[in-house]
Structure formats: C-alpha cells, structure tokens
Amino acid sequence: MNLHTPTGLQTAQARSGQSALVPGYMSGFGNSFETEALPGALPVGRNSPQKVNYGLYAEQLSGSPFTAPQATNQRSWLYRIRPGVKHQSRFAKADRGLIRTAPGARDEADRPIGQLRWDPIPMPDEATTFLTGLRTITTAGDSDTQVGMAAHVVLVTSATENEFLYNADGEFLVVAQEGRLRFRTEFGIIEIEPGEICVIQRGVIFAVDPVDGPARAYVCENYGGAFTLPDRGPIGANCLANPRDFLTPVAAFEDREEPCRLFVKWGGELYVTDIPQSPLDVVAWHGNYAPYKYDLRTFSPVGAIGFDHPDPSIFTVMTAPSETPGTANIDFVIFPERWMVAENTFRPPWYHRNLMSEFMGLIYGVYDAKPEGFVPGGFSLHNQMLPHGPDMQAFEHASNGELKPVKLTGTMAFMFETRFPQRLTKYAAELPQLQETYLDCWDGLKKHFDPSRREPK
Ligand SMILES: O=C(O)Cc1cc(O)ccc1O
Ligand SMILES: [Fe+2]
C-alpha cells in the first residue's frame, strides 16, 4: 500500500487503512497522548533509548519551564527523521509585513482613545499566505516578559507547501470565520471550519493551507502561560467546554527532500532560513504539549434561568491565567446560540466599563447588543475603562419587548479579553474599514429620567 499523499504525508490513521487526507484526532484536553505513524516508532518505557527504531532522532519540545508545577508542566517527545537543528541553519531577517508585537507597536497609532469598530477586511486580490496575510490589530503587554497578547486578522488565499513557520513569542489561537483551513504541523494535521478554533503552541512548526477557497480567521496570540480550561466552580464537573471535545491530531509526517523555507517569529521580528527538506518529519510523538482543535458549537452555555444578566465570564471557553488568581492574561469568551428566558430583566449586556479590555469578533449571525453594523468578519475594540453597551436599537427593543422565552439562533460572537490595555496598530487605525460613525449607534439613547416615574414590581 502506498501511504503517500500528494505532499508525501503519512499519518497514523493512514496506517489503519483510512485516507491520509482525512485528519485523525485523539480526544481530551491536556492529556498525555501518544501516537505513531509507523508501528513501534515510539520507544517503550523510556524517552531516550540509545538508538530509536527506524533510525529516528529523539527530541524534546518544552512548552513550560522544566520545573513548572505538574498542572502546568508541558512537554512532548518527538521522534523525527532529522533533529530540529537540521531544520534550521543561518537565519536572515525577513519582512514581517503587517505583524506587530508588544511592546514594540505601543505608540504606532496616532489616534485618541475611543470605542472602535471595523467592517470585515476584504479578501485580497493578490495571493496571501498565513504569514503575509496576518495583520495585527492590537497588541498588549510585553512578549519578552511573557505577558499580554495580540489580536490579529488573517486572510489566507494561498497554500504554502514548502514554507513553514513557528512562533517563539507565543501561542496562536485561530478562530475560523470564513473558509476552511488545514494546519500541517509537526504533530499531525488539523482542519478547522467556521465555528471551530485551533491552538498552535509556541515553538510548534506548521504550514497553513486554505482548503476550499480564501479563508478569513481571527487570531489571538498569547504571550503568556498556555490557554487552559477555566475552573467551573459551583457549576461542577460538566457544561461550558467539555474536555472530550478537544481534539489533538494523530502523528503524520512528510519525508520530502525539497528546498523549503522556515520562518520564525522571534522577539517581534521575523527570520527565515533555507533548508533542504520538510521540517514536518515527526514519525511519532508523545506528551501533553501538542496542538488541538475545538468546535465552539459543542460549548454548553450556562446562564440566567431566573433573572439578571451574569458577567460574560460565564461563557469562558478557555483562559490564559496570569500570576494573579482570577485575573486572566486572556479570557477567550463566546456568545453562542442560547435561550434567553430571564424574567423582568434587561436581557442584553448592561452598559459597562471594565478593567479588562475587549476585542470582539463575529463569526456568523447577529450579536444581540449590536444588531446593526457589527457584521460577520468585522471586529470591535472596547478598551480598558471605556464605556460601551447595547446600541440604541438593542436598548429600545430589550426595554420594551415582551419577555417570553427567545432563542438566539445561528449566532456565534467571541471576545479576546485581557487585563491589559490593547494598543492599536497603525495598520488598524488607518484601515478604511474603520467605522468613523460607530459612536452614532448610541446617539439616540434618550434621557428617560423622571423623578415621579416608578416601574411596576
Ligand atoms: O461588551 C460586550 O458586548 C461583551 C459583553 C457581553 C456581556 O454579556 C456582558 C459584558 C460584556 O462586556
Ligand atoms: Fe463589554
């Protein structure tokens, strides 16, 4: 049986007779996995035998300090055709395009503070890859000290069979918005469609191909400790994001001797090196540091079944904690399909100002607080302590509508929320898609104050 796909790729699943083009996954969040694309490629009972089967090299990839506590200790062992040092020779500086990193981009945008919203960035006419299509919108914190994040939009129209990338500055959380994306990684293949996300950790080598036409995604780059599942507290052991719905790819490798280029995002810069073979040559691996995907539609929302509107933290899919308990470096929060049943309640978000700053995007559908102007593929920024809330239309509707049970259907919005202020890039500040009239959405909010008015109990 010839197990080679058009890109010469072999997967553990292909070995079991299924198509190598259909990615195979293992279920669970943060598990210690093991997977091999050739039988017996993984050493048994040890990590580093004198010689590894098939003449493979053993290599450890550490995502945390060696001595991190058990719950946050992350590393994997990769058994590969060549060690990583043979995938990297002398580096040259490359054009970083529209990619920015904190704190370097801190003062780039010459624009006063304010609530901001953008229409979708259109798909470009020219071919763009994950790297050339990555556009940074905001940066926060400091990547060198491993705090903060960046919010990007990526537009991918073109595959990169022989161009690979890894990010030393943080992990990428990719939120597919339009079109499907295939991630060929050292650990195997991940495919996502709108409604799904994937996480590619710091240091993991990958290439991204659009599957069936141009693709748009939002990307959160986490400079800090890894995303994990939030504690559920009194909610208990179930609901929200369930661990079994996270999927990690089975091992897959490319044995290709062709001129390739490896890009590395490091310290906010981009570097490139030429290598004579594909770096995706991991035949088997084991460990708990590996990319994964998750379908946001499997999130089980828990909310107000009596009255009032809980804080949006109730919809946290994953959190990247900071050193201060409960004060996240990043919370990744969604607003999925759900029933609204709260009685005598203003059901959309309340008007508010936060310590946390909010980058929001809309994957599909309508967001209840912003029925107009916040469109799929668009995004908004409500920065630290800047007031925001429902637009006039949403306020009027929610204040006067009949409070029968209502289902919000066909909708999926999300928020990258960080404890740090988000600094706008020059690119984002100058985008023609920036809605100069966004503030007008609150214009019609009238003064209703009347000292003699009382609402019925
Ligand atoms: O601002 C927003 O639209 C996001 C949001 C939603 C919500 O239900 C409560 C608070 C909040 O910031
Ligand atoms: Fe908000």
Image: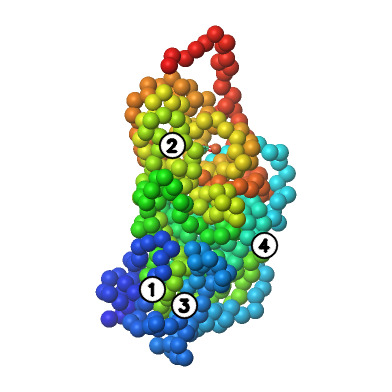
Q: Confirm whether residue 223 shows in the render.
A: yes
Q: Are marks 3 and 4 in contact (CB under 8 Å)?
A: no
429 or 146, nearer to the observer: 146
Circle 2 packing at 10 Å, graded few (<14), some (14-19), many (20+), is many
The residue identified by callout 1 is 34
Could you tell which of marks 4 and 1 lies nearer the N-terminus?
1
* Image-quarter location of ligand 2: top right
The alpha-carbon separation of the residues under discs 4 and 1 comes to: 32 Å
> Residue 243 location, x and y as percent?
38, 57
How far separated are the C-alphas under marks 3 and 4? 26 Å
Q: Is residue 393 above or below residue 197?
A: above
Q: Which mark is first along the chain, 4 or 2?
A: 4
Q: Amino acid at mark 1?
A: Glu
Asked if disc 2 and disc 4 are in contact, CB closer than 8 Å, the reply is no
Location of residue 355 with respect to 135 vertically, above or below: above
Coordinates of residue 95 in the picture (x, y in percent) = 65, 64
Residue to which mark 2 is pinned:
366
Which label's residue is closer to the chain start, 3 or 1? Answer: 1
Kindly report the distance in space between the C-alpha atoms of the residues bearing marks 3 and 2: 43 Å
Q: Residues within 10 Å of mark 1 (few under 14, many from 20)?
A: some
Please give the name of the residue rendered at 45% of the width and 82% of the height, measured from the top-left corner: 47
Q: Nearer the viewer, mark 3 or mark 2?
A: 3
Residue type, mark 2 in image: Val
Pick the front one: 72 or 443 = 72
Asked if residue 190 shows in the view, the reply is no
Distance between the alpha carbons at the discs numbered 2 and 4: 38 Å
**Residue under numbered circle 3:** 78
